[in-house]
């Protein structure tokens, strides 16, 4: 094979490698009508997304573990819960955790009109702001209900819609070992682990953090995970 052809082949191989590297460092989704299931890949970062509409009896223990491990999580809270547990919400924010929006109440977003969905998000935003002084910009739809209409409406009022790549299904309250294996085995680079404040989640949390750190992952908030 001539030197000319070798140069051409090397050129195109370089282009292909560059495109692959670029793809690996881009967010999985970035369009306004598409939710985020992953963050940016190639940085060995992952996030804990903890949806909160109940379970306040287990949150102090989870917060203690996160503090001891030096991990910042993103808590998506409902307004119903925030109003009832405002002191605990202030503690979360004061500890440096990110606060996300899980709707004012746990409604089915697909059943809501545009105006109702906006109210579900904005009413909760105002309540969280009154309690913490922070504005939420991430929306985790209740029940995990999502489509282009929902994400487009959320985007129109400045929100990014957040889903997950690893579901622990901990709301069913399986054994802590099962929650741990689901989190550890399902997550990958740039992944988002979905959790809830349950008793077995509390018992599984420390081991999940330790095992994923052993794999070289760094825990960041969801906003950090999806930022370019």
Image: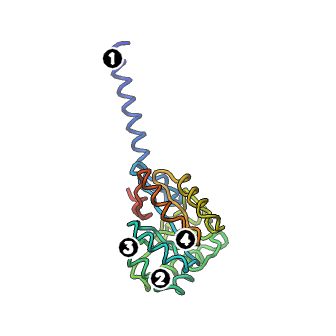
Residue bearing mark 4:
51
Q: Earlier in the sequence, mark 1 or mark 3?
A: 1
* Cα distance between the residues tagged 3 and 4: 17 Å
Tell which of 192 and 209 is nearer to you.
209
* Cα distance between the residues tagged 2 and 1: 68 Å
> Secondary structure beneath disc 3?
loop
Tell which of 222 and 12 is nearer to you.
222
- Asked if marks 4 and 1 touch (Cβ < 8 Å), the reply is no
Q: Is residue 159 left or right of residue 5?
A: right
- Tell me if mark 4 has few (under 14), some (14-19) or many (20+) residues whose alpha carbon lies within 10 angstroms of its own: many
> Where is residue 14 drawn, in percent x and y?
36, 32
Image quadrant assignment for residue 70: bottom left
> Where is residue 103 drawn, in percent x and y?
56, 76
- Asked if marks 1 and 3 touch (Cβ < 8 Å), the reply is no
Residue bearing mark 2:
88
Q: Earlier in the sequence, mark 4 or mark 1?
A: 1
| Residue depicted at 55% across the width and 66% down the height | 195
- Tell me if mark 1 has few (under 14), some (14-19) or many (20+) residues whose alpha carbon lies within 10 angstroms of its own: few
| Residue depicted at 55% across the width and 56% down the height | 165
* Cα distance between the residues tagged 1 and 3: 58 Å
Image quadrant assignment for residue 19: top left
Residue bearing mark 3:
96
Q: Earlier in the sequence, mark 3 or mark 4?
A: 4
Colour basis: rainbow
Residue bearing mark 1:
4
| Residue depicted at 42% across the width and 71% down the height | 98
- Tell me if mark 3 has few (under 14), some (14-19) or many (20+) residues whose alpha carbon lies within 10 angstroms of its own: some
Q: Earlier in the sequence, mark 2 or mark 3?
A: 2
> Secondary structure beneath disc 4?
strand
Q: Which quadrant of the figure contains the C terminus? A: bottom left
């Amino acid at each position: 094979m001539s030197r000319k052809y070798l140069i051409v082949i090397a050129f195109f191989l370089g282009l292909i490698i560059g495109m692959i590297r670029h793809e690996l460092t881009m967010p999985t989704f970035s369009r306004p009508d598409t939710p985020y299931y992953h963050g940016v890949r190639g940085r060995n970062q992952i996030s804990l997304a903890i949806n909160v509409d109940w379970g306040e009896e287990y949150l102090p223990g989870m917060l203690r573990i996160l503090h001891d491990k030096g991990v910042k999580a993103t808590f998506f809270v409902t307004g119903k819960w925030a109003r009832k547990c405002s002191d605990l919400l202030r503690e979360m924010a004061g500890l440096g955790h990110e606060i996300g929006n899980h709707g004012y109440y746990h409604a089915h977003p697909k059943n809501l009109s545009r105006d109702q969905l906006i109210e579900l998000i904005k009413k909760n935003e105002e309540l969280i702001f009154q309690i913490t002084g922070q504005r939420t910009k991430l929306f985790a739809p209740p029940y995990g209900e999502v489509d282009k209409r929902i994400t487009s409406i959320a985007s129109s009022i400045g929100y990014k819609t957040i889903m997950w790549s690893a579901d622990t299904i901990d709301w069913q309250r399986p054994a802590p070992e099962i929650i741990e294996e689901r989190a550890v085995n399902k997550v990958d680079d740039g992944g988002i682990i979905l959790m809830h404040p349950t008793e077995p989640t509390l018992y599984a949390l420390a081991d999940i953090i330790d095992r994923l750190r052993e794999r070289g992952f760094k825990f960041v908030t969801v906003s950090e995970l999806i930022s370019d």
